[in-house]
Image (cartoon, rainbow, N blue to C red):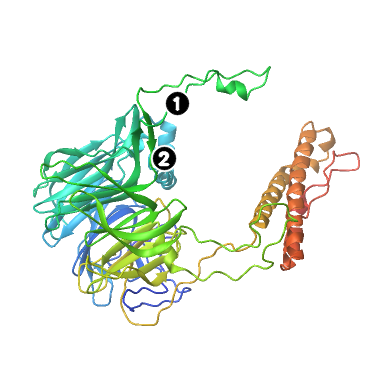
Amino acid sequence: MTTLARGAQIALAFSTLTLSHTVVAQSATEVLRRPVGAPQRVMPNSAVAEVRTYALARVGDRALACFVRAGMARNRGALECAMLRREADGALARAEADRMIAPQASAVAVAWDASGGLIVWVVPKPHRNESERVRAARHRDGVRSMQDSLSNPLGTPGLTAGDVMAQRLAANGAPVGRPTLVFAENARAYRVAVARDEQGWLLAWTGARTREGEVRGTIRAARLDGNGALVGRAIETDFSGQTGDALRWIPHEGALPPRLAWSGEHCRERPEQPRHAQPAQDPSAAIETRPRFVIRQGPLHEHEGPNITCDSLSLYTTTLRADGSLAPLRAGPLLARDALALADGRLVYATRDAVDTATLATSAIDAQGQLVSQRVLVPRGPTVPREAGISAAAGGDDSAPSPSRVGPLPIPDRTQALRAPIALDAAHGRATQRALVALSPTHNRVVLARFEGGSTSVATSAVPIASAQPVERAHEVSLLSGGSDAPWLFVRVGSAAGGPLVYAVIEGQGALVDAPAEQSWTGDERLRTHLLRARAARAAVTDFDHTFGPVSARSDAASNPAMPGLVGSMRRLRARWSDACDSLQARARFLVRRGVDRDLETLARQQCELPPEPAMPGGAGAAPSAQGAQ
């Protein structure tokens, strides 16, 4: 087993994990730490590997984990698959050595069962139009460059273009035959999905198209036969706009055809809206004054036709027709978060209304691609918890007071993470129950719940059972069902660019113990703003004094031609600090008069110990410096 250089030992501390009053309890202060490399045995609450992205599939006591390597290893960026087997003590053992599928990949999806499967991934194209200096910096700091590209998934064509590849897998996860090039995308290829359909497979991925002179995102699909060969051509959808992270295939179910669901912001023509009117004069002339030079604005280049506007983040669905084409897309509800789960052919998603409240719901898709029979799993509520404060009223520091004291920390609300999660997954539970896992918007709480599945179920709510607190920020969660035991939970922690994929066991008996409350600011928001400004101004004075102090203490400071500029800069920074302190101390006095602890005045005074006013060095010696700022 190898230990990575970057701190290497990552784990996940779970206070409680349960689905049907079963639990594995562990104190929040106890942390299981395991090497992140490729351990032969993966103990509960330890890492399988360090990954950028991953895809999972399970059959019985075996699971296939396919992931893109992260970290500082030589094979980082490579696509590998590990066959994991559940042992009697709850650990996962690598049944075989990890297999490399491709030397480089940026997205992955897998469909696999006891008879074999298919893995789909995106091979990023080389970075085009990139200078040698930028290329060297990208190789030197790969983690930060990957972080930047993931935070802006649109990126540049060189960063988001890629070839969509497919490879058949045997029952043991080994590659069969040669990979197939399904499609070559020019941009925005960062999400793929795959599902088994009768004797073949269904593929879908995000791509780009040019429409009305603009490059916009789209969704494409394809069918592969049993040998992994492409059937016909890539299937186009009518979607045009910004594609989201949610992309799911629902294969054949009885008389229902295959269905495709995804999230995005669809752009449509609006012929009922008036056309944009070209201004009669240069708009920059209204903000420039003579005799300053007016920067001429270039003419607008517009294509003839109606206006085009894009909808908010919504759910979209379509069906695969018998002739191999996709039906016109159907627009679903607005989404509160870009997350989508699938349970028994039903979609689980968080909706949003016009007043920014969220509801977790589940719906089926009919033969026409329309969402039907919506059920509410978590009732309507705010997308972000409302935090208590001393004063939320507008006005000066002497305005009418609201509550005089800060209340206690709010009780942890596990339903909040279920109502508007940033990551979501669902799986079979026990009997008719379905398991649900959600990640809170803070990335610091994983919530487990259960609900009754099936179309005939009368239960309309998801019951939160327990919550877990990762040691690091979590970014993705997955539930795997496929046996008689409880689903297996996987959580990816670390940074957005990559981190350990942690495995957790959901079994055992014990009392329900919840994770500790998440930290939140419950004080006065205006005091917090004044405090941050004062600290920033204080830090600026301290930083500048590292230059001003030594120079002013020199014997030749009086004749130094740079000294007047240094004194002026110090005076300006000191004045800025003084202004910030005036506001901070005034707000602290106001709160103390309303009954808040007098320690606020002490805090303000400690932040506002200003140094003496700087002066030009004279014959008596150097001017006083800002050492007091430290």
Residue 424 seen in this snapshot:
yes
**Residue with the mark numbered 2:** 138
Is 616 located above or below residue 515 in the figure?
above
Q: Residue at x 18, y 39 (%)?
A: 235
CA gap, disc 1 to disc 2?
A: 42 Å
Rendered-image quadrant of the N terminus: bottom left
Q: Position of residue 380 (x, y in %)?
A: 42, 61
**Residue with the mark numbered 1:** 276
Element type at marker 1?
loop
Pick out the residue farthest to the front. 272
Is 37 located above or below residue 141 in the figure?
below
Q: Nearer the viewer, residue 292 or 532?
A: 292
Q: Residue type at mark 2?
A: Arg
Q: Position of residue 229 (x, y in %)?
A: 11, 43
Q: Nearer the viewer, residue 295 or 535?
A: 295
Q: Residues within 10 Å of mark 2 (few under 14, many from 20)?
A: some
Left/right of residue 68 with respect to residue 493 in the rendered view? left
Residue 37 seen in this snapshot:
no
Q: Residue at x 74, y 52 (%)?
A: 583
